[in-house]
Image: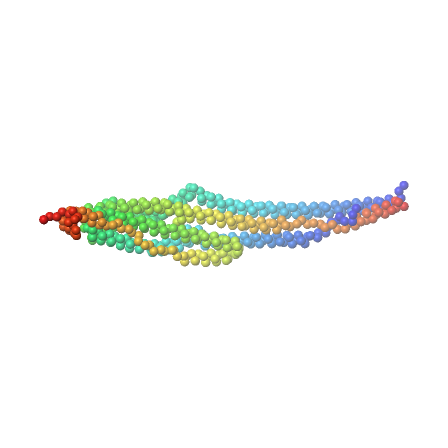
Amino acid sequence: MGGKGGGGGSSNSAAIQMQQQAANEARYKEMLREQRLREGSSAIDELYGPEDASKFKPLFDTYESGQRDYYMPELQKQYGDARKKAYLAHAGAGTLWSSARGDTEADLANQNTLNKGQIESQIQDSLGGLRRQIAGDKSSLINQLYATENPEMAANEALARTKTISQQTPALSPMGDLFKLAAIGVGNTFASANDPYNRVRNPGVGSSNSGAIRYG
Amino acid sequence: MCDPMSLVLGGLSAAASLASNSVQANAVKKQENLNNQWMAMQQQARRQEEARQEQLRQQAEGARSATVQDMSAPNQEAAQGAEQARLQEKLGGNEPPPGEGASAQQTGAVPAGKAMGGQEFAADMGARVSKATADARSRIRALAQVQSFGGTQGGLQTRNALELNQGEQGINLANNLRQGSLSAFSAVQNIEPVKLNPVSNPWGGIASALGGMVGKFGKA
């Protein structure tokens, strides 16, 4: 028999108490962290989402109408100018009341509708870009929240970002010439040149060698 | 025959040995109890953690399945159709075309006050302009259809990217919380069971000494 083997003393109980305390502390801290993350997420969601809701609608509307107000008057002006140019060209060519004039007007109307559609399409694309940017900002803020676990900072940052977005400027570009006019009066000139009666009336230089009919 | 002294000492030694065994058995039992308590505590903590993990996993799964639902073919088709209709309206593809018989004056093809070509000319020009405009609007509607798949505000490219992004955010939040909870649980796993340290057992020493004396007397 040995002199040892009895029990009753617990020399590691102090260490275990510390371990237990550390575990409780870790759980409590995790609970607080979870609360902070949920609060921060809610704050960001409240400021950002959903993007289609009324919160961002005025912003999208302003962004859209601003571009439309910039582009459309220019389109209308160019359309008016092109029609005026066509009118004068037809008048000069003597085809003002001909079907050729109808074709020109129809062509310009076609171009006008297509240009209008293209401009609107460009505006709608830019709105898509704005929506994606808003979503991207929201993602960045959520990532920041994970890094800092500070809901207050996340909310403030979200507010600042939404303000920055409302100062967003669309990339407006000069439009250039939107309307292309087909040559007006070329066919008429050609027809005049080949009209024998017209040649008689306007013999021109060197007409003796050109096979023009001469009388007397 | 045995010496009576040896017998007494031997008896005492046996009694001390029994007492020592009893003390040892008690200590083992105590340690067992403590081990069982520790195991119960660990099991409970593990069960709690499993429940927490499951709850958060379901939260992530909810975000994932909502995204899958949003990305389903019928939902994408509906979203694309709605965006196409919206774009057709915005791009001017739905504007009513001027009637076939509309005069040139009505279609705006002839500057006001300068219509001199007669009714026939005006009607012809009006018809041409109407047809050209209708053709252009037909192309605009096609453009709207194509655009609805792209990067416009509600176009599929934009919409799907945002849906995926939203789902990812839900999953990431749940995953982040799961990781945090696991790390807190690892602190519980680190708690050791109480270990009773061996202390000197007097009965063992007495039994041993008496045993030695029995040996001496026996030889003498």
Residue at 58% across / 50% down in the picture? B183
A17 sits left or right of A33 in the view = right
Percent x, y of residue A53 = 42, 51
Determine the image quadrant of residue A172: bottom left
Q: How is the image coloured?
A: rainbow
Q: Is residue A69 above or below residue B81?
A: below
Q: Residue at x 53, y 56 (%)?
A: A148
Instruction: Farthest residue to the front: give it.
Output: A209
Depth check, front residue: B86 or A83: A83
Residue sitting at the far left: A216
> How many numbered marks does the figure carry?
0
Give residue B160's position: percent from left, percent from top.
44, 46
> Toward the viewer: B215 or B48?
B215
Taking B126 as reference, is B44 left or right? right
- Picture coordinates of residue A56, whole percent (x, y): 41, 54
Asked if residue A198 can be seen in this view, the reply is: no
Q: Is residue A78 visible?
A: yes
| Residue depicted at x 58% and y 45% | B50
Residue at position x 62%, y 45% from top?
B43
* In the displayed structure image, the side of residue A194 where residue B63 appears, left or right: right
Residue B182: horizontal and vertical position, in percent? 58, 49
